[in-house]
Image (cartoon, grey):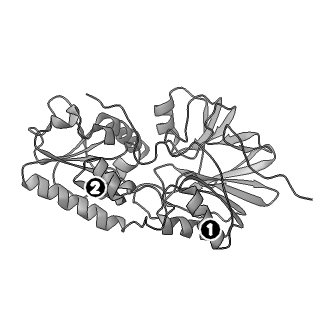
């Protein structure tokens, strides 16, 4: 007799009937288990939240007053008829894969993840399971990332060349995760200024004990004249804006996995794009899936059709789950502080 699945897929999100909770739901629910703080996964309106201790400060900053409980990596929590535990996803600080176990059967929801350590986020840890629900943002063979240290070297050299030419370097990056990863990884060339949206997250993470270099919030009196040769980290929406033009002679660049696609870089009218992603590339996705030793894979947001087909050709029992994740992956539209 077939057993009911541990997790089901509903129009509100991924649901656990035996525990009566959802994972990263996109409609308001009573109890939500959250993988990380990006707004397509952590949404406002739920009655109760559960996330890692490391993720909660940013989630509270973004969602305001919420009823939330923290949990440690590897800690077990019994909810109804299942046990849940959170494990590092390597995506951004505090991000987690959520494992749900019922009578020895384990399903894991990955959220977003990457397998290469970045020196800031808790390193990805594969979780043995029977069913793995994987993102597929970059689920095509063309997406293969160079080692982080090489790309950070490129960014540092670009910054140094701009500074030598008397220009400010403005680097667009998502304000939660990517911006801090860049700050932690680039070399020391000169002062680092930040957009307000980036600096707010910096302060939260510093207060949690994450190690970031000194930065100065760009604002009145803090510009290219006061900080010549600076690197400015700002959300992508700030590139080309009046806010960016106040830095005078400047070079702009964007750090994203999508910079691997020449057409996207051209549409953004960017002379320079650095391929840096907080998501696994194609080999990384396969490495993560193999490491779980799972019997079945469901793929969500991204190149789902092509990636599912590839997995099936490799012998996996693979399916597609329609979700509402991914709208904020890598290239969000954020308001610009003026």
Label 2 crowd (10 A; few <14 / some 14-19 / many >=20) = many
Characterize the local packing of mark 1: few (<14), some (14-19) or many (20 or more) Cα atoms within 10 angstroms.
some
The picture places residue 2, in percent across and down from the top left corner, at 88, 58
Q: Quadrant of the N terminus?
A: bottom right
The structure residue drawn at horizontal position 64% and vertical position 30%, both measured from the top left corner, is 28
Would you name the residue on which mark 2 appears?
273
Name the spot of residue 332 as percent of width and height, x first. Answer: 41, 41
Residue 25 horizontal/vertical position (percent)? 63, 39
Could you say which is closer to the camera, residue 322 or residue 215?
Answer: 322
Q: SS for tag 1?
A: helix
Going from N to C along the chain, the mark reached first, 1 or 2, is: 2
- Would you say residue 184 is visible in this rendering? yes
Left or right of 235? Residue 26 is: right
Instruction: Quadrant for residue 314, please give it.
Output: bottom right
Q: Give residue 51's mark.
A: none
Identify the residue position indicated by label 1 in the image: 311
């Amino acid at each position: 007799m077939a057993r009911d699945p541990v997790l089901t897929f509903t129009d509100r999100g991924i649901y656990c009937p035996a525990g009566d909770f959802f994972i990263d739901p996109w409609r308001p629910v009573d109890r939500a288990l959250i993988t990380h703080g990006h707004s397509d996964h952590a949404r406002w309106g739920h009655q109760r939240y559960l996330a890692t201790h490391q993720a909660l400060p940013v989630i509270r900053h973004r969602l305001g007053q919420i009823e939330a409980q923290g949990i440690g990596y590897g800690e077990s929590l019994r909810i109804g008829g299942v046990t849940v535990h959170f494990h590092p996803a390597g995506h951004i600080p505090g991000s987690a894969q959520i494992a749900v176990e019922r009578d020895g059967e384990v399903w894991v929801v990955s959220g977003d993840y990457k397998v290469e350590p970045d020196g800031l986020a808790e390193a990805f840890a594969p979780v043995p399971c029977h069913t793995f629900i994987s993102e597929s943002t970059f689920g095509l063979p063309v997406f293969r990332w160079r080692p982080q240290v090489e790309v950070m070297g490129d960014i540092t050299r670009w910054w140094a060349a701009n500074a030598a030419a008397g220009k400010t370097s403005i680097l667009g990056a998502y304000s939660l995760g990517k911006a801090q990863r860049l700050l932690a990884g680039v070399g020391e060339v000169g002062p680092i200024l930040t957009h307000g949206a980036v600096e707010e997250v910096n302060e939260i993470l510093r207060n949690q004990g994450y190690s970031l270099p000194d930065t100065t919030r760009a604002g009145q009196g803090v510009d290219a004249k006061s900080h010549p040769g600076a690197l400015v980290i700002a959300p992508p929406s700030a590139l080309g804006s009046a806010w960016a033009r106040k830095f005078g002679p400047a070079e702009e660049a964007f750090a994203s996995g999508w910079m691997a696609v020449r057409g996207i870089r051209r549409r953004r009218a960017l002379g320079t794009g650095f391929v840096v992603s907080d998501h696994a590339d194609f080999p990384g996705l396969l490495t993560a899936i193999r490491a779980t030793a799972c019997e079945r894979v469901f793929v969500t947001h991204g190149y789902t059709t092509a990636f599912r087909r590839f997995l099936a050709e490799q012998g996996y029992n693979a399916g597609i789950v329609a979700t509402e994740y991914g709208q904020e992956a890598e290239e969000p539209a954020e308001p610009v502080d003026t």
